[in-house]
Each structure stands twice: as structure tokens, then as C-alpha cells.
């Protein structure tokens, strides 16, 4: 199945939802002219379709494998990665002083979307690298930035994030990896790292010249739990003072996981310090490692949310092509009894329109959030806070959406969707990890109702919903107005019910967490509907073809008429409280 970049829709989302023209008015992003934006979006799409998409099936069927301590990728991956580095696709949003292009994150997001749709497993390699760049920029010393960033920004060196350990899972505070200070010798001032990490994406490979591991570990005497964690830079090869690569560090891959999907991405078990000589250097201050790592995780969470859009786009394109080509049965009620393409049948038409509405709504939400992140980087405090609120929505709703769209894609194919040779199953298998890693979607929802809902006493969410309500007043958006109001009321309920309110005690943590997932879904759908409808409103001045404009208007209407009412049901769930969840004892529930 070939991949066709959705460049027109991406450019529309960048201009309307991310507000790229407004960003380009700032000196920092002044290079992001309309011509350059189009060139980057279309160039990234052509590169992804031509270089990475042809490797997608091979990456799935052959996968990464471990041989004599080396991770081996299928033929073609090394050449495709070199082409990616040579073309500069890794450096779009990185600062110019480190070799980047200094362009908006939202524009880099469009390039990454193309790469992920073309080959999701492969795209995880640069995705983690981009997060490491953010961590070193914000927390590294000038010497660390000078030593590592030019190579990592270019993509010649890749990077990883090492949090999880076998006994800890999502409880990062339970880690056992240690970092012992070195008092003398050639590595004086650094640390000896010892421990094991699991689920390390692209933890070992030969596509990049070096791999920069960012590793969480505990120093001697550190406080227990997450308060005693520090972050360390641990390179695969030592870096000499002149920037050249020295001997290999004392670290190795123990095994790679056999996964449901993303087979091209080596998910490694990594061992550090088996011989007592794994050397790392502290990034940031001792016991502040989790804060430093969250810089990387926040970036990764947005990029994982983008994966939901990426895989939805690819699954949708394949389903559309199959439905157009597959001839089966006459149209119900038609006088002509000749078989027709299945796209003519009502239920297939329903599935395809839902796939498109979800995919384009997810893209609108994603690019809107990216635009807020860009504004936050320009010291717009209101945008920074709104971005904080949006990140868990992007990560959780977009990835759940990607799984749904990929599942519908299998359904459109019918029995052939369950057969691996068609490729529809790969999209579903690849998509299924995205709601799990970088913090499960339950964790994202918990973050929304505990930390993010509390921002400015709830005013960050209230102002967002009020803006949506103001937009939706009148016209064909009354249901969106109602949804935004319901989101606001539910948020008030979760923050603390007014005295005399007989609904379940919203101040109970169980009630908040029990409500968190449907509340997040309702809020995310409200924002996505708003942003998708803004695209439809912008069509008269966008200069797009009549066919594209007609389709966009119908897709926006479908989202408002079908998905917004569903979201009202989610919010009804969110106000039920958690008492029913505990009506049964654990033994009764699991018997």
C-alpha cells in the first residue's frame, strides 16, 4: 500500500489551527514564510513517501533482530536514515546555534507526521532524539550543549530515554539504577552508572554514529522515591574533548522485545555497568532528574499523540483505496443489480466518513496544541498554560483515535483485513502501543484532572471552554456550545461541588480519577470540533479546490453532528463518581 502525503490538509491545519502566519510575524520565526512552509511540508511528504514508506512492510515482516550483541535492521534502513540526516529533516525546530533551522515546532510536527505515517516504527528513532534535544537545551550545561547538541540535532547521533525498570513499571520512583560519584582519575566529577532498564526505544543500533542515553539513576544517600532521582548523560561511545569518539562505554543491549507491532523499532533491555565502568555525567542538579526528564517526556507525549494522527492517516488511506477497488454486491434498493464498489454501501460509507472525521479532527487538535507550544516558547504565558492543559488531551485522545481508525480500517477490509498480506492489520498492531507508552492514557487523564485542571484555579480550562462557546454561538454549532458548557460544568464539579450539591463528592480523589478518562475524551472532542470547524470557516480565503472545500465542510459537519453528541455521553459518565467502581470487592470483581 502506497502512502500519499496529505500536504494540503497539513498546510491548512498549520495556517488555521497552529496560526503559523501569526507566528512568522515574530522575529524568532520570521523565516517561516508561506513559501518555505509549503516547501517543507511538501518536501517532507515526498521524502517520506519515497524513502521511508517502501520500508514499512519490510520493517514489519523482518523487524529488528539481535545478533552477537548487535541490533540488525532490514536492508535499506541505514541508507534511508542517512538520507534523512543529509536532508536536514531532524533539525527543523532546533536552535540555529546548534545547527538547527530555528523554525516553529508546529512545522517540525508536520514533517514528523509524514515520516510516522510512512513508517511508524522507523520514525520512533528521530522522535526520541527530538525529546533529548529539548532536555539538553533546558537542563544541560554550556559544555554539554556544545559537546552533544550539534551531533544530536543533525541526527548523526541519536538519543534515548531510560526510565523504566523491570520491578518499577510506571512507578519511576521505585528505580534501582545507581550513580556513584567518581572522586579521581580521568573521569573525575562524573558518575559510575549501574543498573538495568527496559522498554528502551532504539536503545541499540548502528544507523547513527553514537547513541546518547539519558538515564535516570539514584545517587548515594538520595531521598527515597521520585524525590531522589537524578538524570545522567551516558553515551554509547565516550566523547573526547575534541568531539571525536573514543572507546565504547560499559553498556550493552541484553535483549530486544518481541512485540505486537512496530517491529522495525528495536525495543531494548539495556544493561549499564556490568564491568563497573559505565561512565555518565549529571545533567541538571542531583535529585531533580524527574523534572529534567519531564521536559523530554512532555515533548514525547505530544509526539506520541501525533502518532495517533499518523497511523490514522495511513489506515484511512488504505481503507479508502480498498473500498474504491473492492467490487461486491449491488447497492441496496437499487434497480441495477450489478455489483458495485463497496464504497457505495451505506455502512462502508459511514465507516470511511468516521475515519476521515476522526483523523482530520485529531490533526486539527494536534496542530492547535503545537501552535500553543510555539507561543509558549515566545514567552506567551497564557499559551504556555493552555499548552500544558492540551498535552494530555493530545496524547490520550489522539492515540485512542488512532487505534479506533486503524480498527475500522481492518473492518472495511472485511475478512481480508484479518489477513496479514493486505497490511491493514499492521496499522492496527502498530497503533496499539501508542495509548500505552510515554505514560498510559489513564495516567494522562489523571494528570488532566489532578494537575492540569488545577492550573490558575481552573481558569485555564474555563477560558478555553468559554472561547469555544463564544465561537459556537448560533449557526450549526449549538451542539458544540452545549458540549463546551458541559465540559466547564463538569470541570467545576471535579474541582469541588458547590455546598448543597447532591452529586457524588467531586473532591474525592477516587471520584476524580474515576471520571478522568471520559472527562478527557469529552474535552478533547470539544477542542477538536472547534478547530476542525475553524478550518471549514477559513475555506473561502484559503484558495483551495472546490472538491477539497466541499469535503472539508462535510467532514466538519459530521464531526459536529456525530462525534459531539457522543462526547456528551462521556461527560455524563464523568459525573457519576467512583462508588459503582467499588461496589464489588476486588475478590468479587475478579472471581
Image: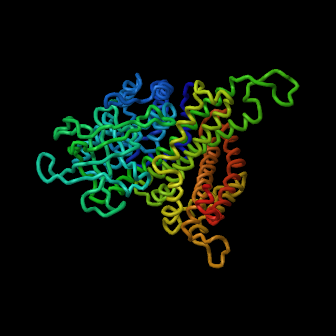
The residue sitting at the right extreme is 335
Q: Nearer the viewer, residue 174 or 153?
A: 174
Relative to 436, residue 343 above or below? above
Residue 187 is situated, as x and y percent measured from the top left of the image, at 15, 47
Residue 46, can we see it?
Answer: no
Indicate the quadrant containing the N terminus: top left, top right, bottom left or bottom right: top right
Q: How is the image coloured?
A: rainbow
Q: Residue at x 33, y 39 (%)?
A: 153
Numbered label tally:
0
Q: Which of the two residues, 115 or 287, is positioned nearer the viewer here?
A: 287
Residue 213 is left or right of residue 574, and the answer is left
Residue drawn at x 51%, y 57% as measured from the top left: 389
Question: Residue 4, image x and y in percent?
Answer: 55, 28
Pick the residue in front: 84 or 511: 511
> 26 or 264, which lies in front?
264
Q: In which quarter of the view is residue 3 placed?
A: top right
Q: Position of residue 164 (x, y in %)?
A: 39, 49
Horizontally, residue 76 falls left or right of residue 3, namely left
Residue 225 in picture, x, y percent from top left: 36, 61
Q: Which quadrant of the structure image shows residue 291?
A: bottom left
Q: Is residue 327 above or below residue 109?
A: above
549 on left or right of 287 = right
Quarter of the image where one finds residue 147: top left
Q: Residue furthest bottom?
A: 500
Name which residue lies at 32% across and 57% down: 229
Q: Quadrant of the C terminus?
A: bottom right
Residue 431 visible in image: yes
Amino acid at each position: 500500500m502506497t502512502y500519499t502525503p496529505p500536504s494540503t490538509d497539513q498546510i491548512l491545519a498549520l495556517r488555521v489551527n497552529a496560526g503559523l502566519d501569526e507566528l512568522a510575524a515574530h522575529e524568532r520565526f520570521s523565516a517561516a514564510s508561506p513559501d518555505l512552509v509549503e516547501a517543507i511540508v511538501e518536501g517532507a511528504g515526498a521524502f517520506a513517501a519515497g524513502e521511508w514508506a517502501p520500508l514499512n512492510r519490510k520493517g514489519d515482516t523482518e523487524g529488528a533482530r539481535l545478533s552477537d550483541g548487535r541490533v540488525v535492521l532490514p536492508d535499506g534502513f541505514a541508507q534511508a536514515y542517512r538520507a534523512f540526516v543529509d536532508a536536514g529533516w531532524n533539525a527543523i525546530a532546533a536552535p540555529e546555534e546548534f545547527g538547527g533551522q530555528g523554525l516553529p515546532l508546529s512545522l517540525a510536527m508536520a514533517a514528523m507526521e509524514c515520516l510516522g505515517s510512512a513508517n511508524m516504527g522507523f520514525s520512533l528513532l528521530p522522535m526520541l532524539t527530538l525529546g533529548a534535544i529539548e532536555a539538553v537545551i533546558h537542563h544541560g550545561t554550556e559544555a554539554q550543549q556544545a559537546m552533544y547538541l550539534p551531533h544530536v540535532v543533525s541526527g548523526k547521533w541519536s538519543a534515548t530515554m531510560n526510565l523504566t525498570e523491570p520491578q518499577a513499571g510506571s512507578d519511576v520512583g521505585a528505580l534501582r539504577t545507581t550513580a556513584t560519584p567518581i572522586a579521581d582519575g580521568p573521569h573525575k566529577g562524573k558518575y559510575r552508572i549501574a543498573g538495568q532498564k527496559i522498554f528502551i526505544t532504539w536503545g541499540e543500533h548502528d544507523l547513527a554514529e553514537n547513541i546518547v542515553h539519558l538515564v535516570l539513576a539514584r545517587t548515594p544517600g538520595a531521598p527515597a522515591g521520585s524525590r531522589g532521582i537524578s538524570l545522567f548523560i551516558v553515551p554509547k561511545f565516550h566523547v573526547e574533548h575534541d568531539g571525536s569518539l573514543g572507546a565504547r562505554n560499559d553498556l550493552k543491549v541484553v535483549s530486544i522485545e518481541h512485540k505486537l507491532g512496530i517491529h522495525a523499532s528495536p525495543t531494548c533491555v539495556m544493561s549499564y555497568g556490568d564491568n563497573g565502568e559505565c561512565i555518565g555525567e549529571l545533567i541538571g542538579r542531583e535529585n531533580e532528574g524527574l523534572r529534567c526528564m519531564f521536559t523530554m517526556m512532555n515533548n514525547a507525549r505530544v509526539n506520541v499523540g501525533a502518532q495517533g494522527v499518523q497511523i490514522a492517516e495511513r489506515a484511512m488511506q488504505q481503507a479508502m483505496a480498498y473500498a474504491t477497488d473492492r467490487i461486491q454486491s449491488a447497492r441496496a434498493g437499487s434497480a441495477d443489480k450489478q455489483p458495485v464498489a463497496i464504497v457505495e454501501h451505506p455502512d462502508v460509507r459511514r465507516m470511511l466518513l468516521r475515519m476521515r472525521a476522526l483523523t482530520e479532527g485529531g490533526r486539527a487538535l494536534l496542530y492547535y496544541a503545537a501552535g500553543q507550544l510555539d507561543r509558549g516558547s515566545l514567552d506567551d504565558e497564557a499559551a504556555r498554560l493552555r499548552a500544558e492543559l492540551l498535552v494530555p488531551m493530545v496524547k490520550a485522545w489522539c492515540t485512542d483515535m488512532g487505534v479506533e481508525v486503524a480498527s475500522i480500517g481492518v473492518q472495511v477490509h472485511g475478512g481480508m483485513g484479518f489477513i496479514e498480506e493486505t497490511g491493514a492489520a499492521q496499522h492496527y498492531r502498530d497503533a496499539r502501543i501508542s495509548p500505552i507508552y510515554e505514560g498510559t492514557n489513564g495516567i494522562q487523564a489523571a494528570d488532566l484532572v489532578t494537575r492540569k485542571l488545577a492550573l490558575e484555579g481552573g481558569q485555564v480550562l474555563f477560558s478555553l471552554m468559554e472561547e469555544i462557546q463564544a465561537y459556537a454561538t448560533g449557526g450549526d454549532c449549538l451542539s458544540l456550545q452545549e458540549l463546551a458548557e458541559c465540559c466547564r460544568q463538569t470541570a467545576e464539579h471535579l474541582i469541588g461541588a458547590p455546598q448543597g450539591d447532591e452529586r457524588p463528592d467531586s473532591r474525592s480523589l477516587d471520584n476524580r480519577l474515576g471520571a478522568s478518562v471520559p472527562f478527557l475524551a469529552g474535552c478533547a472532542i470539544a477542542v477538536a470540533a472547534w478547530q476542525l470547524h475553524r478550518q471549514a470557516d477559513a475555506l473561502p480565503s484559503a484558495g483551495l479546490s472546490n472538491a477539497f472545500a466541499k469535503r472539508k465542510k462535510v467532514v466538519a459537519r459530521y464531526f459536529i453532528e456525530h462525534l459531539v453528541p457522543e462526547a456528551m455521553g462521556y461527560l455524563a459518565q464523568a459525573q457519576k463518581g467512583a462508588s459503582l467502581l467499588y461496589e464489588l470487592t476486588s475478590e468479587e470483581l475478579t472471581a
